[in-house]
Each structure stands twice: as C-alpha cells, then as structure tokens.
Amino acid sequence: MTEEGPSQAGQDAMLGLDEPKKMTREDWRKKKELEEQRKLGNAPAEVDEEGKDINPHIPQYISSVPWYIDPSKRPTLKHQRPQEEEEDYVSSIGQWYKRGVDEKPISTKFRKGSCENCGAVTHKKKDCLERPRKVGAKFTGSGMAPDEHSQLNLALDYDGKRDRWNGYDPEDHHRIVEEYSKVDQAKRTLKAQKLQDELASGKLDQVMESLPRYILVSPAQEREHDSEDEDEDKYADDIDMPGQNFDSKRRITVRNLRIREDIAKYLRNLDPNSAYYDPKTRAMRENPYYNTGMNPDEVGFAGDNFVRYSGDTITMAQTQLFAWEAYEKGSEVHLQADPTKLELLHQSFKVKKEDFKEKQKDTILERYGGEEHLDAPPRELLLAQTEDYVEYSRHGAVIKGLDKAIARSKYEEDVTINNHAFIWGSYWRDGYWGFKCCHSMVKQSYCTGAAGIHTAVSGFTLYRLVHVCMHQEKMKEKKKKKKNKKNKKHGSDSESDDEAKKKEKLIKALDAECQRLKRVDEIMLLDERKRPYSSLHEVKQPTEEEMEAFRMKRGREDDPMFAFLHPPS
C-alpha cells in the first residue's frame, strides 16, 4: 500500500493538467472579432489579475500563460515586470543619516559597555572624539556625554549616490525666505518712519518748493512711487548693461536682432561676385554695392566695416574702452549715465598721459643720453614700413586706406625727347622698340605724328630688309672663317693616322680580352676555397676599345649560330 500511494498521486496530478479543449469555429470567430475591436479601441481592454489593462497589440504568446503551468490562470503581464522577490532593497528618498546627538535624557550613571572617557553608549574609548579626561566618567560617575544617533545603513542605487540634493532639509529654505522677508519688512518700516520725520520737520515741503512747477506732483504719490522703485530696483546700480560695463568674470551674450521689414544682407546684391556673406556670424563686412558705382553714404547698408570705421564710431569705442578700464580700477563712470563726466575724465587722462610720456623721455635722456639717435630719418624711409591702416578684400583689392605706392627707380622716368608724346620703348613691333606716338624705330629721331604712322609700314619693311641682309652676310663670313680653321687643324693625313691608331688599340684590346676569358675559365675550374682573393673583380675603368672588344667576344646564347661558332669542347 505504501508503494502505490505516491504513484497514484502523480497520476492524479497528470490528469489535472489536461490540454485546453478545442474551440469551435463560432467561438474562434467571436474571439478574433473581439481582438479586432480591442485593437481599434471600440471594446474595453482585457484586464489581468492585478486589475491593470493589457495592451491589445501585445502578442498572445507574451500575455497568455502556458496551459501546462496553470490552465486556469488568466492572461497577465506580471511576469514581464520586475519581481518583488528578486529586487534589491533601496532606501527611500526621505531616509538619511541623522545629525547631532540623541535628544533622549542624558544618563546620570555609568552603564556597562559605555565609553570609559565620556560615558556614551554609542562608542568605545578608542573611538571617543572628546578630549581625554584626567579621570574618566567610569570612575567619577558624573559628566556623562549624550549618546549619538545610531546611524542607518543606507542602501543607495546609482542615482541615489550621485544625487546632489540627497539629505537636504526643505525647512532650511523656509528659514532663509523668512529671514529675507523680515529684512524687507524692517526696511519698509524704516522708510515709513523717515518719511514721517521729514513731514514733521518740514524738510519735504522745502524740497518740493524748489522744484519747477512742470515736474511737481503730490508728495504722497512721489514718495510712494520712489519707495516702490527702490524696493524693486535696490540692486539696479550693480547691474551691468549688456555691452557697457565689461566684467571678465561674467560672460554676456547679446543677439543681434533685426526688424522683419529690413532687407537681408545677402539679398541686397544677388551677384555671386559681390560682397561675401558669412552665414554663421551673419556678417557682411564688405560693401554689397561696391561694383555698382553707388555712393556708400546714399545706400541703406554699406557693409559692417563702413558702420564700424566711419563717423564717431572709433571715438565712441575708445571712450567705451576707457570707461571699462576705469570701472575696473574703481572709478564709477558710465558712458550712458554720465557722458559728460566720462568725456572730461578721458580728456584729462590723455593730457596726463602725454605729460607722463614726455617727462619719462626727458628723464631717460638726461640719465643715459643718446638724444642724437632720435634725430634719425623716419621709419618709413628706413624700413619702408608704415603704421597706416589698410584693409583688403578677399581678392586683394583695397577697401579702406591708401593704395600701395609704386616703387620708383633712381633713373628719370616719363621724360620725352625730340617733341615725342611718349617715351622710347612705348611701342614694340616684330622684336624692335620705338615710339608709340609716331611708330618710329629710331631712338634719336624727331616725332612725325600721324604721318609717321602711315609711312611706318613701308619704312619699317625697307629697314628690316636691309638689316636682315647685313645680318646674313655677317653670318656667312663667320661660317667661312670657322671652316678654314678646321681645315687647317684637321687635314686628310691626320684623319688617316687616327684611324690606324684606333685599329691598333682595338687589336690589342681583343688580345687582352682573349687572355682574360682564358684566365676566367681556369679560375672557374678551381675549387672555391683555392681561388685567389678578388680574382674576378677589376677596379679600373674600361676604355672604349676594351668595351668594343668585350662586345665582339661576348657570346649570345639566343643567337642561332651560337652553337656553330662555339662548339662544346
């Protein structure tokens, strides 16, 4: 009976996991229609065991539970979510280390296991942070220190460890807000009290009487308006206007805004060869109407450089730079707020600067001398360099400034002679120079004007023919002289002697080549270890006869007659 019990229970369990019954055609059709209606949103979505909707677009093999696990279980997505038993414990957002000491009543007796120095239970003597007592609390039984908080063991995740506001108490912010509100309330009270004192003493009436009538208002309205402005803008003096008070520690960026009715810079001249437009900085430095012949003062936009370097812009920029430097050194000056004060200060600064330079120069010359070196020629004459500002376009054309001066030579230029309107060399034709005014090719001739131009063709042709004939005669004489010299040096006898000498040298070279080949064959028959050192290498340069003998004795294996001329021995 004991052996049949377990087997019977296993069979019952297997019978309980029956396969689902096969659906009829009508049930299958209704199921598909319901799924389509759920996907279209016309039917409510299916709900899982936790009461959460199941997305109808999720496939069935994800949402449904296999029949062999639990056939009675409804479709669910619980297995797709993080499982509670597998999740790591993480501390909540409100948990943090406790600060300070425990507010419980301090013990009056020494407790077993407490610190022998201060009497606190939360640490031992070696971890105590108090000054070591001469007689510890263990022996005196008095002066017990309060217990510290037992700190929590926080389990923080990745974001919790890097949260900069972790452990922040919001009550601290409320305390700061309350403190500032009390300060503002105290200021308002002081202003109201000061106003009452001025009204009681009559000072306010005297100030109002001294003002012009066109700016008089009721005292109550004026003081109320002033008090509101002072409360709202009590820090207005310390605020820098963008682009005015420059501070290197702060970076202020102001975008260039334009009106919608303004014409875009790149639409002013559609010629691709006109001024270059930089789309990144929205800048067009050159004048877009430069090649149209229009006056820059008459057009609406003549380039950024025209605005930047025309009128009082340069003076304004220098004054603004002086205001920034003075503000950094402690002077309360502002270009818009105190323009007159700034201008006077700038003028006095220039005068003092020039006086200081002159005084410094005189002091150096008095001490070290060398005043005679200051009388040297200007730098423009010494180094051909100037400090003049010249601005060029992308193609090398001068936009602003003087053109580069043309280099002059030490000779006289543009000097006409003999009534000529142009200089010698202003006309060139067929390799000859002349005058452009009369086409004359003679340097010291007088100008004949238009008549000389008409007769220049025939006269030039005749002059050229004579010149060519003379040149040809000279060349023939030179050739004859060269031939006579050669004939004298190299006669017929000398030529025959040279040929005989060449034949003798060639015969000697052939004999030497035959001996060399025999010597090579003998050396090749010897053992490698018995061959003489460097026997196959010769350093001297071969002559022409030796090279010719080598070519004549060299065997050509690709020659059909090679086997007949060189039979095997």
Image (cartoon, grey):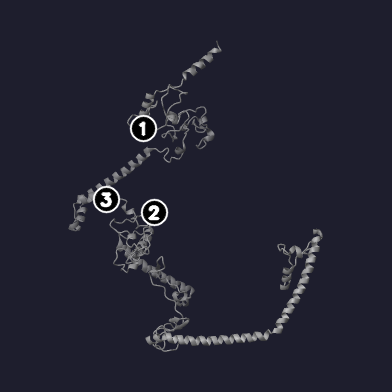
Q: For this rendering, which residue is in front, 446 or 46?
A: 446
Mark toward the viewer: 1 or 3: 1
Real-space Cα separation, disc 1 to disc 3, in angstroms: 62 Å
Residue 17 vertical placement versus 363 (above, below): above
- For image coordinates 43% across by 41% down, the residue present is 164
Q: Quadrant of the N terminus?
A: top right
Q: For this rendering, which residue is in front, 120 or 262?
A: 262
Count all numbered tags in the image, as a single digit.
3
Real-space Cα separation, disc 1 to disc 2, in angstroms: 55 Å
Could you tell me which secondary element the residue under label 1 belongs to? Answer: helix
User: Seen from this angle, which residue lies furthest top?
Assistant: 1
Q: Is residue 206 left or right of residue 260?
A: left
Instruction: Give amino acid for label 2.
Output: Arg
* Image disc number at residue 39: 1
If you read the primary sequence from the N terminus, does the residue marked by circle 1 or circle 3 appear first? 1
* Image disc number at residue 428: none
Residue on which disc 3 sits: 229
Query: Residue 560 falls in which quadrant of the image?
Result: bottom right
Instruction: Give amino acid for label 1.
Output: Lys
Instruction: Give amino acid for label 3.
Output: Asp
Residue 195 visible in the current orientation: yes
* Image disc number at residue 251: 2
Local crowd size for mark 3, using a 10 Å CA cut-off: few (<14), some (14–19), many (≥20): few
Q: For this rendering, which residue is in front, 126 or 403?
A: 403
Residue 340 vertical placement versus 122 (above, below): below
Mark toward the viewer: 1 or 2: 1
Could you tell me which secondary element the residue under label 2 belongs to? Answer: loop
Real-space Cα separation, disc 2 to disc 3, in angstroms: 28 Å
Q: Quadrant of the C terminus?
A: bottom right
If you read the primary sequence from the N terminus, does the residue marked by circle 1 or circle 2 appear first? 1
Residue 532 locus on image (x, y percent): 80, 63
